[in-house]
Amino acid sequence: MGMRASRSRPTVAIVGAGAAGTLTAAHLAASATRDLDLLLVDPRPSTGRGAAYSTRDPRHRLNIPATKMSAWPADPDHFGRWLREPVEFPPRADYGTYLGAVLGEALAGAAGHVALERRYERATGLSRHGSRLRLRLGTTGACPVDAVVLATGTPPPGTRWAPVALARSPRFVADPWSPGALDRIPPTATVVLVGTGLTAVDAVLSLDRPGRVVHAVSRHGMLPTVHAASPLASYPPPDLPPGDLCLAALRALVRRHVAAAVAEVGDWRPAIDSLRPVTAELWGRLPEADRAEFLRDDVRAWEVHRHRMPPDVGARIAAYRAAGRLVVHTASVVGATRDGEVTLSDGTRLRDAIVVNCTGPDLDLRGSQDPLLLELFASGCARPGPLGLGLETDDDGRVAGAAAPFVWTLGATRRGRLWETTAVPEIREQAAQVAAGILAGLRSRRRAPRPRDPYGLPLSTTTDAAEAYGEALHRVLCLRSGADAAMTDAVDRDPGFALGHAGLALLGHEWELDLDVDASLDRAARAVVRRGDERERGFVRAVIARVRGDDPTSSALVRHIDAYPEDALAVSVAVPTIAFHGAAVPPEETWALVEGLAPAYGRDWWYSGLLAFVRQEQERWDEAAGLAEQALDVEPRSGHAVHARAHVYYETGAHEHGLAFLDAWIGSCGESVSHRAHFSWHAALHELALGDDDAVRRRYARQLAPPHVHGVRALVDSTSLLWRCALAGMWDGPPVRDVLSTVDPELLARPPTAFVAVHAAMALTAVADAAGLSRLRAHAAGRADLRDVVEPITGALVDLVEGRCAAAAATLWSLQDRVPRLGGSAAQREIVEETLLYALVQAGRNDDARRLLRRRLDRRPSTRDRTWLRRLQSSAPSRENRQ
């Protein structure tokens, strides 16, 4: 699901595309009067079938008459009209097709304001984030949604009853409804069905072969009863006694009610059917201990009478038994061997047996291994219902837990509270109730909406302050100047806007702006306590830790992004393409962080530019170029995309094209870009590679000399360019001191990162400041993050300044594998390689200099490098060779 520029349409995710999920989606589509997005998540290839209606075997019939199976409670004949031919118990496959058609009709009738997206994957987690939820999916990551419906259907059958040897045997079919499970049973094998309910009945019908005997085993040996051959008169439900109810009293009530029905209408079935409207109330009035006793002692008797076979299916099963093709055992499996011998508790031994687990769904979710349920229980977003049956819910189907009131459920997952909740007549009523509840909740939120940022995250502020914040964020994402002014405007409009104050502090810190960062942090901390949601509080905490140095690795910021990937301001700080801090993690972890954001942003222009930069770092040039062009087609001012494209041009040696591209952009969209000097630096690199010395000097004067640059930007872009010019011999005495006059001396003596430190060292080398280099070296030696690379590089530069070129070359040569640890881009780190080349030539190690140049030319073409190599090849042999 790609991000929109502005999310105003609410999204409801429905987990499960079986009957419950499809009916819920249909009711939402039919009832919604405003724009609504539906996300239907289920790995099954079909919609509307689930486990119950996925069968294609025409012998598998509905177990409830078609007249009771309409999707719409107010239109009981809807399914019958859809069938066209009156069939009381049609094939279950037909009903699955019907449900899909019902959803299609509901969407078509929604006049375009309801859109549905189908995801063929598993939901694996759910968490609450402010006023929204985040649904995690197995392959595509997380989706922000406004409500979730858990319509997961009946759980798979349990296998705890199976002996270990059987459970591990290839002759054990753990779930008969898994695709093709019964088709793989050899025609000559003995089949043992464990369980004698409706699942076993379906299995008997599917496994019927001439000469095959099927054994069905259960502790009670009872098969389901059969519907009457012709419709019976209805019967009213019993009058319920007031007050609490015990199981003994319930048993007596049901016996009296059945006896009265038999006496009045001549059949027990209407009495059982008449209990349907009061079953949930009866269940709810039983103490929990009595419910447990019912599950232990009474449930099977209830189920064989409540869930019955169609008459023709009952007749077929009776014929199988009479012919000896179906043998029912009142027993249990007590032993099994891997070679197919099964022993029953009645002493029966069956050889060459395939055992099929027909025990029905494992109703106790406390032992579930479903990843979504495990995550829900672990996070507190849900908890098991009474006796572990289903989920704990309110009376209207809202799931109790940390994600309430935005998570709903229906069907089998409400069994703990309702008991009778798995048949379509109950599920369709629940689907209508859930749809009405969700839409009412969305309407109430819509009446007093919180403004949102461009990526859909709610903001605790006024509409006009949110508008200014959105402008500031857009400028940050484009790398345009003026973001600080827009952020200041936001807090002027709403002085209590915590996120605005935190954003202002962050901009001041990251971009070295003339702002009172500490004051902004204090205002953010105070404001977010008074008015801020969970996401905003987390952002303020992460900003304070980062700015005040309590979190040198930015782990709090990374955790915040993991929880709220749509927080683009946090991402732009943690993963800058032009900056000097970022999250202190290895490049591979940064790449993983960016790549993991794809589900949240999709084809969003800013994210495409960010991903383009990652792809160029991975040397996937074509992908990087394509992503950059994709971003620029939408937002021509996208600085990240331009930056990625600039690197692709440089690293692939397309210097003429790169220079033309950058000059055109700098002269148009780039006029208002922040860090404009860095784009000019990129253009100057192309001019250097082309050997156009005059162009480099002109560009420096126009775009890279003070007052166009100051601070860190002056150090990293302008002085590094001047040092390259000096190394290349094309500028004798470049004005490095003029540029360094704009840099805080503290930045040269105690730089915050290895990347800034190595550029400080090169600047000090350019002005031959051996004392400054020594101070910087001492600082690096005392810092664990600088000691391994910056300290020896600085020592080599001291040697270079003091004329010990051979020592400098030896040290820099030995450090080549460590240079990537400095951070920054390959083009920026190249300054170390340029210095090494110079030191090698000055030390007379021309052979090594040539090897290094050839290696670089293999990587990319460069007119200057080819010229340099020709000069070295025509020069005298290296000192090592002469010796």
Image (tube, rainbow, N blue to C red):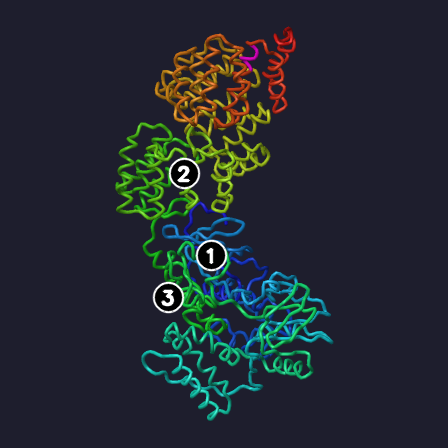
Q: Quadrant of the C terminus?
A: top right
Q: For numbered disc 1, what is the local secondary structure?
A: helix
First to last magenta residue range: 837-841
Q: Residue at x 34, y 46 (%)?
A: 459
Residue 619 sits in quarter: top right
Q: Which mark is residue 374?
A: 1
In magenta stretch: residue 430:
no
Q: Residues within 10 Å of mark 1 (few under 14, many from 20)?
A: some
In the rendered view, tell whether residue 773 sits above or below residue 196: above
Q: Residues within 10 Å of mark 3 (few under 14, many from 20)?
A: some
| Residue in the foreground of this view, choosing between 672 and 398 | 398
Q: Main secondary structure of the magenta part?
A: helix
In magenta stretch: residue 840:
yes
Q: For numbered disc 2, what is the local secondary structure?
A: helix
**Would you say 621 lies left or right of 419 here?**
right
The answer to whether residue 442 of the structure is visible from this angle is no
- Extreme residue in the front direction: 347
Query: Hey, what amino acid is under mark 2?
Result: Ser
Q: Residues within 10 Å of mark 2 (few under 14, many from 20)?
A: some
Earlier in the chain: of badge 1 and badge 3, it is 1
Name the residue beneath numbered marker 2. Answer: 555
Query: Hey, what amino acid is under mark 3?
Result: Asp
Name the residue beneath numbered marker 3. Answer: 394
In the rendered view, tell whether residue 194 sits above or below residue 654: below
